[in-house]
Amino acid sequence: MAAATGTAEAEIPRAAGAEQASAGAPAMTHREIMEALSGLLLGMFVAILSSTVVSNALPQIVAELGGGQSAYTWVVTASLLTMTASTPLWGKLADRTSKKMLVQCAIVVFVLASAGAGLSQTTGQLIAFRAVQGLGMGGLVSLAQTILAAMVSPRERGRYSGYFGATFAVATVGGPLLGGVITDTSWLGWRWCFYVAVPFAVIALVVLQKTLKLPVVRREGVRIDWLGALLVSAAVSLLLIWVTLAGKEYPWASWQTLAMTGGAVLLGLAFLRVEATAADPIIPLRLFRNRTITLTAGASLFVGIAMFGATVFLSQYFQLARGQSPTMSGLMTIPMIAGLFLSSTVSGLVITRTGRWKRWLVTGAVLVSVGLGLLGTMRHDTEYWRVGVFMALLGLGIGMMMQNLVLATQNQVSVSELGSASSTITFFRSLGGAVGVSALGAVLSERISGYVRDGMARAGLDAGGSLGGSGSAIPDLDALPAPVRPVVEAAYGHGIGDIYLFAAPVAVVALVLVVCIREVPLKTHHGD
């Protein structure tokens, strides 16, 4: 695809010739593609860094702001929820207007929300700003894959998807390490975990302006399906609120459960009806007539549940079960990130050379399932080398699946539907992540409460408000009495191990779906 000259993007009509124009345009060289992607990769780095930099600081942040396990869960879930709801909107806009302008807007939204989060005085304010962060993240995650697909044929896309995976891995490992150092530095403090992304974002915006030049594809009479977006957001939000509160504020079997789950189902059915009749639906249901897209969407949903739902609690494990500092917590997750970096890069290069991708998806799903199952055996005193091996297996599996599920989907659609198809897969992965974090967070809260009560009873101590349990503040291990600390550490170690056992069968479902996908060799041109 020929790049437009000058700083303004060339405008071409959305017509039948759009695909043919893409297919017939001179191919970009590797150097031209990397120059065009440099700002985009930097923008992705900023977004992921801003998200992961707080991961090891969250236990301290939530404790300082007076929040409990539910607040911890919602600080993560809020951004995943808004990312889920906004991803299809960004994808729809990308099919109709300037992708460059959209990705710049996404960066601005994300960074402004990050600065606001740093000023938060309560967990409620922090959760609100994290929700706004999710809007920007939804744009960056969705648009990155869409822009790559607009420049590179499916066959060559695996190679560049590997670069995205590598960027993701570096930011993911660098974020927690940087956040740990910032949190442990007395003259900085955790608020600088949110401020640190601002200078990187400014650089990303400048580089994007200079290097990313894409044609603007426009269609007359564009309509955004705001009603569909509202309905799917309301359905998911109601479901997550129910999962978070059930078992604590009211029994699982109660009228509140019936009202919330029934309401979520009705909203979901209303969403499907709106999408079926909308002239320009936010998630085109016709995409699901394609068996591969249906299976990759389902696999993405279950991978999101397993991946986000399990990995987000690792910082709690290392800090509250093993007593490590935020900095050490970041260092101890390196095996998982190294596995993700290695597998995403290698799989991308090999897929580009061979055009075959299914074996990587199947192998990745197996490794995710095995890694989660093994992590389910860990306790607070498990040897670290074992935990490291388990994390490495999980990272290898995630690296093989995350980018390649999008690649398999993009290979099934025309250029005109790249944005919708890419954002649909990202939507299901984000939806799975939001559901996974919320559901597994609720399970974790309940398990820790029970383990603390049992441990205190065995030690002949007063539970005193079920330390670390449902609705109580995240404990400060250093402030706990000597007899109580080992009880709390053991409870967190056992409770976090349990959630991996819940996540493993979900990953097995993703494996089954991936096995059922029929492999179609990657196209060598956009219009094939």
Image: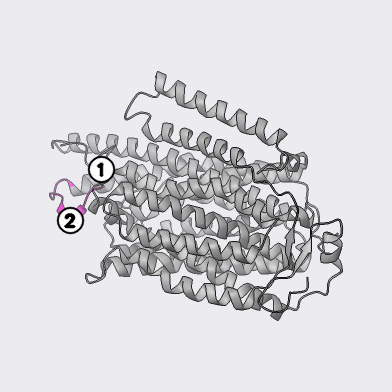
Residue 515: which quarter of the image? top right
Picture coordinates of residue 252, whole percent (x, y)? 39, 24
The C terminus lies in quadrant: bottom right
Q: Is residue 80 above or below residue 509?
A: below
Using the image, tell me which numbered label, if any, was put on residue 478: 2
| Numbered-mark total | 2
The residue at 59%/38% (across/down) is: 227
Q: Which residue is mark 1?
A: 468
- Within the magenta stretch, is there residue 482? yes
Residue extent of the magenta highlight = 473-484
Of the residues shown, which amino acid type is indicated by label 1? Gly
Residue that lies at the very extreme toward the front in this rendered image: 221
Whichever of callouts 2 and 1 sits on the residue coming sooner in the sequence is: 1
Q: Secondary structure at mark 1?
A: loop
For image coordinates 58% across by 73% down, the residue present is 208
Relative to 96, does residue 156 appear above or below in the rendering?
A: below
Figure quadrant of residue 144? bottom right
> Where does residue 160 sit, x and y in percent of width and height?
67, 69
